[in-house]
Amino acid sequence: MGHIELRDLDDDDADAVFEMMRDREAIAMAAFTAQDPSDRLAFDARMRRLRNDPAVTQYVVTERGGFAGTVGAWTTDDGDREVTYWIARHAWGRGVATEALRLLVSHQATRPLYARVATHNQGSVAVLEKNGFSEVSRSTAFAPGLGRETEEALYALVPTVE
């Protein structure tokens, strides 16, 4: 999978990220999204806030040098380290998300790492499990991307015991 790489997110990536995050099918899969994915002002404000937060790490995922999505990590209000990824639909089904998450995890020293996923998103569940994450709990919450309550699973990647 040497054709998948991560690079720092920069201002020039904003248009591609915004368009990717407006894909209706991807929004339905992610479920827990922005209230209004087409609100560019809210998107830009969120991007500025994230880029200025030292606890947030964001990367662009590239496939053979072209834009394929984003991955990132941040520290939650509870002090946990959580990861996220959003892969552009044109890159689905080829292992891009699995490799991008593997690369992100290799840059994160903190364990456990956490991730959240809508349980109906079996592709994303598989990505987490291939990277060693295990489900630790489930809850139901309102998902803006679906406009209704849906089930979400919390996954953890715990330290390996030697």
Image (spheres, helix red, strand yellow):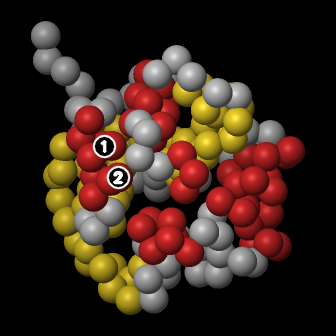
* Kind of residue at badge 2: Ser
Q: Residues within 10 Å of mark 2 (few under 14, many from 20)?
A: many
Q: Nearer the viewer, residue 88 or 58?
A: 88
Q: Residue at 68% x, 46% y: name it.
A: 53
Q: Are marks 1 and 2 in contact (CB under 8 Å)?
A: yes
In the picture shown, does residue 1 fall above or below 104? above
For label 1, the residue is 128
Mark drawn on residue 53 = none
Q: Percent from the top left, x then y, of residue 161?
A: 14, 17
What kind of element bears circle 2? helix
For label 2, the residue is 124
Q: CA distance from mark 1 to mark 2?
A: 6 Å
In the picture shown, does residue 104 fall above or below 71? above
Q: Could one spot residue 37 in this view of the protein?
A: yes
Q: Percent from the top left, x then y, of residue 25?
A: 50, 71
* Kind of residue at badge 1: Leu
In the picture shown, does residue 3 fall above or below 156? above
Q: Is residue 115 left or right of residue 130?
A: right
In the picture shown, does residue 25 fall above or below 158? below
Q: Residue at 18% x, 50% y: name it.
A: 135
Q: Residue at 49% x, 81% y: name it.
A: 144
* Residue most extreme to the right: 12
Q: Percent from the top left, x then y, of residue 152?
A: 29, 67
